[in-house]
């Protein structure tokens, strides 16, 4: 991998600070592979406690909000207009150390640089560490950031942990969140006070690696429609005695559905649309597995992501329409769960241009790409806050223990963030 240019204008201690924070939190939250920082759980709390301890040693003020998110800033909190940056600190089970955490460490690094060099930006900077961004634990995304905007619903709070069965409400309460206030739909922030929200995040795909870019500026964030559990119900039978036209085979029916949806995917892409489809869970009941048995039931997930809400809506209609056709042709039945929706987000053009200009000033590529993954930034963008994102190059993808972000690439992203904060005019 080509190493990015050394960050312009950053003191050497800032890079050391970042490296030590990454190493310390990786050690504090390590699992048998990678790291595990469950949403509103022990690993997430350990990471936040360490960030708070280090911040206070750097004379950075710390505050915890009613959703148990943590904010960092220089000086006293007197309210008023400010730039906000940050990301989440939770991870998927046995995930990578940089997903989310990089954005929080970046913000703290900029605050530390301002403090060490006695710099006062034109607009005050605050850094936020969100809890509960990952859906892996409760099947709900952006819990910490949604809480800020009064978007967390009662059914979200009653969602249960994948392993313990404990509700999200109980877990949030255990770390100090005011669940009653959150359940009432009360906003925990004043969106008009946020001049800009900028999230630095590792890229979770291969584009920056392939194009040899240390950083890139994000243009938009895909939304998604997720079905965690769709059931296809047919009828069991002997594999040797039931001819094709009399079968009610759940596996072949579900496979037929996936094949048809891929055809729609291809057509949408050929017409210039933006779309990715995934069926990450696909299984029959292991209690009845047999080579010679026609399976009578199959469970699968289905996820669609796009930057266009109309495309997501159309896909869900196509999915249900194809199910009706297959039900008739193959004499099976599809049973749907309630889907989980996340709206696409368009990022602010002025902030995108300002971030591109900051990259150019740092002698970095001024390139832009869309984000296929979801981020807390989408909640801010759709909540009316001018929003931007910086991607940092990262090898081996994400949501796995092998994330490999180079520190020089990270510091290049930090330099872009710092220059943006110093130069952004309201």
Image (cartoon, rainbow, N blue to C red):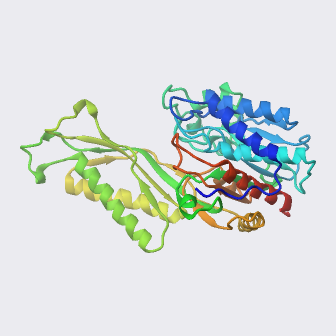
Q: Is residue 14 left or right of residue 33?
A: right
| In the image, residue 312 above or below residue 146 | below
Residue at the outermost bottom position: 271
| Quarter of the image where the C terminus is located | bottom right
Can you give x and y, in whole percent of width and height, for residue 280 in the image?
A: 40, 46
Q: Is residue 62 left or right of residue 88?
A: right
Quarter-wise, where is residue 25 in the image?
top right
Residue at the outermost left position: 241
Can you give x and y, in whole percent of width and height, for residue 289 in the image?
A: 22, 34
Q: Nearer the viewer, residue 45 or 180?
A: 45
Residue under the image location 20 percent in, 51 percent down: 331
| In the image, residue 334 above or below residue 291 | below
Residue under the image location 60 percent in, 64 percent down: 369
| Quarter of the image where the N terminus is located | bottom right
| In the image, residue 415 above or below residue 183 | below
| In the image, residue 315 above or below residue 102 | below
Quarter-wise, where is residue 66 in the image?
top right
Residue under the image location 72 percent in, 51 percent down: 411
Residue 189 can be seen in this image: no
Can you give x and y, in whole percent of width and height, for residue 13 in the image?
A: 81, 43
Residue 132 can be seen in this image: yes
Query: Number of numbered discs present?
Result: 0
Can you give x and y, in whole percent of width and height, for residue 60 in the image?
A: 85, 38
Quarter-wise, where is residue 198 in the image?
bottom right
Residue at the outermost front position: 2
């Amino acid at each position: 991998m080509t190493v990015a240019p050394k960050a312009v204008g950053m003191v050497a201690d800032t890079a050391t600070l970042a490296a030590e924070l990454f190493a310390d939190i990786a050690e504090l939250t390590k699992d048998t592979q990678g790291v595990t920082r469950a949403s509103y759980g022990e690993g997430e709390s350990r990471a936040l406690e360490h960030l708070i301890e280090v911040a206070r040693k750097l004379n950075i003020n710390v505050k915890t909000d009613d959703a148990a998110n943590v904010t960092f800033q220089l000086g006293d909190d007197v309210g008023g207009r400010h730039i906000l940056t940050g990301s989440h600190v939770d991870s998927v089970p046995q995930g990578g150390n940089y997903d989310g955490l990089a954005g929080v460490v970046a913000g703290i690094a900029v605050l530390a640089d301002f403090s060490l060099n006695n710099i006062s930006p034109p607009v005050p900077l605050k850094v936020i560490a969100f809890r509960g961004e990952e859906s892996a634990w409760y099947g709900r995304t952006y819990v910490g950031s949604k809480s800020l905007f009064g978007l967390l619903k009662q059914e979200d709070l009653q969602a249960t942990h994948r392993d313990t069965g404990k509700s999200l409400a109980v877990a949030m309460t255990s770390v100090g969140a005011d669940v009653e206030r959150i359940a009432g739909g009360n906003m925990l922030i004043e969106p008009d006070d946020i001049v800009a929200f900028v999230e630095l995040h590792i890229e979770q795909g291969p584009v920056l690696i392939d194009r040899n870019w240390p950083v890139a500026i994000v243009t938009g964030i895909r939304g998604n429609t997720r079905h965690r559990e769709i059931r296809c119900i047919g009828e069991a039978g002997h594999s040797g005695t039931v001819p094709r036209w009399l079968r009610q085979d759940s596996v072949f029916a579900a496979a037929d559905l996936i094949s048809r949806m891929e055809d729609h995917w291809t057509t949408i892409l050929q017409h210039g649309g933006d779309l990715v489809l995934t069926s990450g869970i696909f299984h029959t009941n292991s209690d009845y597995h047999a080579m010679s048995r026609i399976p009578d039931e199959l469970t699968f997930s289905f996820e669609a992501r796009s930057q266009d809400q109309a495309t997501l809506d159309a896909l869900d209609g196509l999915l249900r329409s194809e199910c009706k056709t297959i039900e008739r042709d193959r004499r099976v039945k599809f049973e749907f769960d309630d889907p989980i929706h996340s709206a696409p987000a368009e990022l602010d053009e002025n902030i995108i241009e300002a971030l591109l200009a900051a990259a150019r000033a740092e002698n970095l590529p001024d390139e832009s790409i869309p984000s296929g993954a979801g981020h807390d930034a989408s909640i801010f963008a759709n909540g009316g806050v001018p929003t931007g994102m910086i991607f940092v190059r990262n090898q081996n993808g994400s949501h796995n223990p092998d994330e490999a972000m180079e520190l020089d690439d990270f510091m290049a992203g930090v330099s872009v963030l710092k220059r943006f904060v110093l130069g952004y005019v309201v």
